[in-house]
Amino acid sequence: MAMQGSPVSWPRTSPTESTSSTTFSFIADDTERSDAFPAVLIVRNSKFYLEDGTVILRVRYEPWGETPEDHLFKVHRYFLERDSEVLRRILCLSPGKNGQDGMAEETAILLPDVTPVETECLLSFLYFGMYERDVPLVDWQALLSISSKFKFQKIRERAINEITTHHPPLDPVERLALAAKHDVPQWLKSAYVELCQRTRALSPLEAKRLGLETAMRLAGAREAVLQRRLERLDVMETAGVLPTEDISLIVSQVIEAEFFKERPKINIGSHSSSVHEVTNYGAPPPLPRRKRMKS
């Protein structure tokens, strides 16, 4: 396996710019186009275009208003087929006339609906995942996306765990969007509670990201929490200051009633997910009361 040096961090590249660790080799410049992919700039990935690779992958990147790019990765089939049934099927499909067999750049196998950055993060994990390193949160998000799409279950579980335990934690709006897109139900309640407890309301951009229905439900939940707190003013010993645990309990109860009690199906952004049909987050249901024995 031909690699350039020993990895000290995950090689990661922005599609729009090169870094000191990864550079692009251009097969076609601005005036010379590929016959196989007309009007497309062909870009070899310097970290994952291996001399002894057994399959060539193609990932399309289309920057707005600029020339589309096909990023090529030449890697070993084994790493792709070992843990992903989806990729195993893609790589093992018999190519038809002018089909994609991955044996040459002209017949590179297209990986649909993924980005060059996501692909590079996946390959970095597959090749170098056993090394301890400080991985940026954005890379774990990229790994969650591509591992969910291609059914790399172990990598997906690792990405979910790393995002869940990351400090500082991921923004709750982003957490809700990722939970809906990639079916991660365990992130829902904590994100709703966090948004309901914070002092500032949703910004227009956040409301747009979450979608109208979710934004309205959160506004209703925040109002319900405020009403519950006002109702308890007359029984409070201090001037309007509830103990922290009481506030958390109120918020949790409101969120349960608003989002989970009736098993609502909620669209977040442009994505719809089954995670919103999951109920009974948090504490388990109360045990049934025992009947008293007559004496």
Image (cartoon, rainbow, N blue to C red):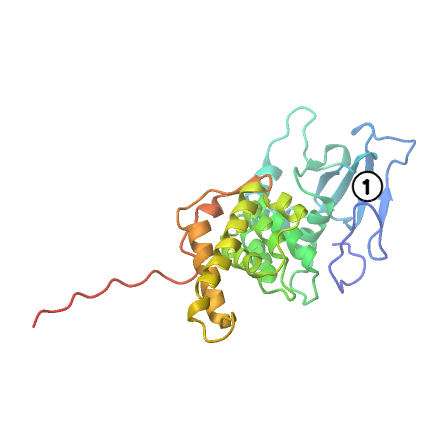
Q: Position of residue 100 (x, y in %)?
A: 68, 32
Q: Is residue 241 above or below residue 101?
A: below
Which quadrant holds residue 31? top right
Q: Amino acid at mark 1?
A: Val
> With 96 as the anchor, is 243 left or right in this view?
left
- Residue nearest the observer in this picture, 144 or 252: 252
Residue farthest to the right, as pictured? 31
Q: Is residue 238 visible?
A: yes
Residue in front for this viewpoint, 141 or 37: 141
Residue 112 image point, x, y percent: 66, 37
The residue located at (41%, 46%) in the rendering is 263
How many marks do you count on the picture?
1
Q: Residue at x 34, y 60 (%)?
A: 285
Q: Quadrant of residue 150?
A: top right
Which image quarter is the N terminus in?
bottom right
Vertical order, 230 against 202 (above or below): below
Q: Position of residue 28 (x, y in %)?
A: 87, 35
Where's the C terminus, which quadrant? bottom left
Which residue is the extreme one toward the left? 295
Residue 217 in percent (x, y) is at 51, 47
In this image, 83 relative to 246: left or right? right
Q: Residue furthest front?
A: 234
Residue 65 is left or right of residue 256, and the answer is right
Please rate how many residues cluster around mark 1, counting C-alpha atoms within 10 Å: few if below 14, some from 14 to 19, many from 20.
Answer: many
Is residue 78 among the parts visible in the rendering? no
Q: Residue at x 45, y 60 (%)?
A: 228
Taking the view exactly as shown, the residue that stands out farthest to the bottom is: 237
Residue underneath mark 1: 43
Occupied quadrant, residue 21: bottom right
* Nearer the observer, 88 or 234: 234
Callout 1 secondary element: strand
